[in-house]
């Protein structure tokens, strides 16, 4: 079994954010940190070198692959902010129609800036993902 490359680290989030050149992305990242911390009741922690995660769960797939991942997370990438808050449930599919301006990836939502989306809808998507993952997998403290 191969070792997971992306793992939780002790890297300092402020150091990571200080390397971002786009001031709007820094501002949005700080707002997302607050929103996601409130949604999970957890503090932000770096997951790999560029993902800011909240909470933790342990997954194990039928293939035997297992590991730890954040309940919800985001990454302020150069092209867009990647929101890892989506769990592909029927409830979320309905919510997405009212989210605002975004693009969908396989497992994440891409936005240019927070003002492009409805934060109340994002909150509901985050809450449903946390509930889904907490029910399906073992949440870790």
Image (tube, rainbow, N blue to C red):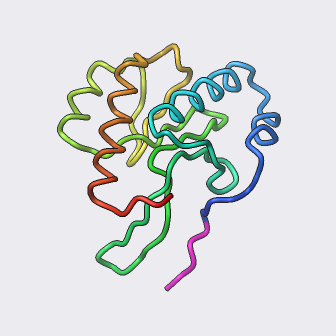
Rendered position, 123 above or below 130 = above
Q: Horizontal and vertical percent for residue 75?
A: 60, 40
Residue depicted at x 53% and y 45%? 54
Rendered position, 137 above or below 129 = below
Q: Horizontal and vertical percent for residue 90?
A: 17, 39
Magenta stretch: residue 3 in it? yes
Residue furthest out toward the left: 90
Residue depicted at x 43% and y 19%? 119
Rendered position, 36 above or below 60 = above
Q: How many marks?
A: 0
Main SS class of the magenta portion in the image: loop
Left or right, residue 20 beside residue 134: right
Q: Camera-side residue: 116 or 41?
A: 41
Q: Horizontal and vertical percent for residue 111?
A: 50, 27
Which of the 4 quarters of the picture holds residue 39?
A: top left
Left or right, residue 8 beside residue 16: left
Magenta stretch, residue numbers: 1-5
């Amino acid at each position: 079994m191969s070792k997971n490359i992306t793992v939780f680290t002790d890297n300092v989030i402020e150091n990571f954010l200080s390397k971002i050149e786009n001031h709007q992305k820094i501002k949005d990242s700080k707002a997302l940190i607050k929103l996601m911390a409130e949604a999970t009741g957890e503090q932000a922690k770096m997951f790999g070198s560029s993902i800011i995660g909240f909470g933790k769960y342990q997954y194990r797939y039928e293939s035997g692959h297992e590991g730890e991942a954040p309940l919800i997370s985001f990454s302020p990438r150069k092209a867009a902010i990647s929101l890892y808050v989506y769990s592909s449930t029927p409830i979320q599919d309905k919510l997405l129609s009212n989210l605002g301006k975004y693009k969908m990836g396989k497992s994440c939502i891409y936005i240019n800036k927070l003002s492009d989306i409805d934060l109340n809808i994002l909150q509901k998507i985050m809450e449903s993902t946390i509930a889904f993952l907490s029910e399906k997998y073992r949440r870790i403290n």
